[in-house]
Image (tube, rainbow, N blue to C red):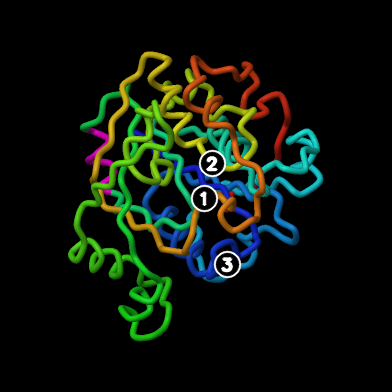
Amino acid sequence: MKTTAVIVSRNDNYGGNLIERSTYCLQSSIDTYDEVIYVDWNSPTQSLLWDIQNNIKFKGNLKHIVIPPDAAQHLTNYDPHAQVCCEALGRNIGLRRATGDWIISTNIDIIAPRKQDIENTINSLNENTFYTISRREVELSTIKEFHGGELKYNQYSDLREFLISNSEERHFDETTVKGDDYSIINCCGDYQIAHHNVWNTIRGMEEDLIYSLYTDTNVQKKAVMHGFGLKAIYNPAFFHINHGRGGGGFLDGINRVTNDPRRAILGQKETRNPDTWGFSDIDIEFETL
């Protein structure tokens, strides 16, 4: 069994302390998953990875894909309101190129679960069900306190053991609009996991949803529309490093337009994506670290 995690971000310090959060995320992900695909979308300068590379011990399982601003504009049809870090398209680029049996779509703010824990969980999952795992919260100040007032990225494993021992399952049910039976939990997109056959059948995220909000719920409804099960689970423990308001940048005014929930949720049937979802007809370069 091979696992792949797909992570998308942008070098804009979204939420503050992005350097710290992304370092914990990518280092723990490299150690947990067999393959990590990091897609850097529309960074105004260099890829975020180059700002944190000296903090990370690479193992040869990280694929680094860069979509620079000119390519990002082209792929979003030069829409001025497209999400500056377009999650639907960025994730699809990674999902389409993932080689794992089980694929995890997750975020840059996450301390990944223990490798043995996620593998044990996967062994109990149904290959015909789409899963979302509820996150647990941690403040960056708590992390610094554990490390004695500073950040020690090479000791993230000890930090994770401490957090697991001092946390509880987070049961936070949520719906976004009337008629939404698909979100299931708050922030359902922080950790979505399914067999690669599920992702390939639903063709990833809907590629016309290039604005902020509702994409995570949308992909869960798509799974149901294609005949798969949908379930929330609460273990293994993984931790979201809090960065204030979320909302895909909408609440902070970074993105001014949101996807229409009537289209994204209520009106979603089977996927509208073509066979070339994830821009599979375009040769996208990557490097392995």
Q: Quadrant of the N terminus?
A: top left
Q: In terms of sequence position, does the residue under pointer 3 or pointer 2 come before the other?
A: 3
Question: Could you say where residue 151 lies in the image, as x and y percent from the top left?
Answer: 43, 78
State the separation of the CA atoms marked 1 and 2.
Answer: 6 Å
Residue in view at x 51 percent, y 50 percent: 247
Q: Quadrant of the C terminus?
A: bottom right
Question: Could you say where residue 35 lies in the image, as x and y percent from the top left?
Answer: 47, 43
Q: In terms of sequence position, does the residue under pointer 1 or pointer 2 come before the other?
A: 2
Q: Nearer the viewer, residue 282 or 183?
A: 183
Which residue type does callout 1 highlight? Gly
State the separation of the CA atoms marked 3 and 1.
Answer: 25 Å
Q: Nearer the viewer, mark 3 or mark 1?
A: 1
Q: Quadrant of residue 238?
A: bottom left
Q: Nearer the viewer, residue 138 or 51?
A: 138
Residue linked to disc 3:
52
Q: Residues within 10 Å of mark 1 (few under 14, many from 20)?
A: some
Q: Residue furthest front?
A: 178
Residue linked to disc 2:
213
- The majority secondary structure of the magenta stretch comes to helix
- Number of numbered discs on residues: 3
Q: Nearer the viewer, mark 3 or mark 2?
A: 2
Query: Could you tell me if the residues under marks 1 and 2 are in contact, i.e. CB atoms within 8 Å?
Result: yes
Q: Which residues are magenta?
A: 116-123
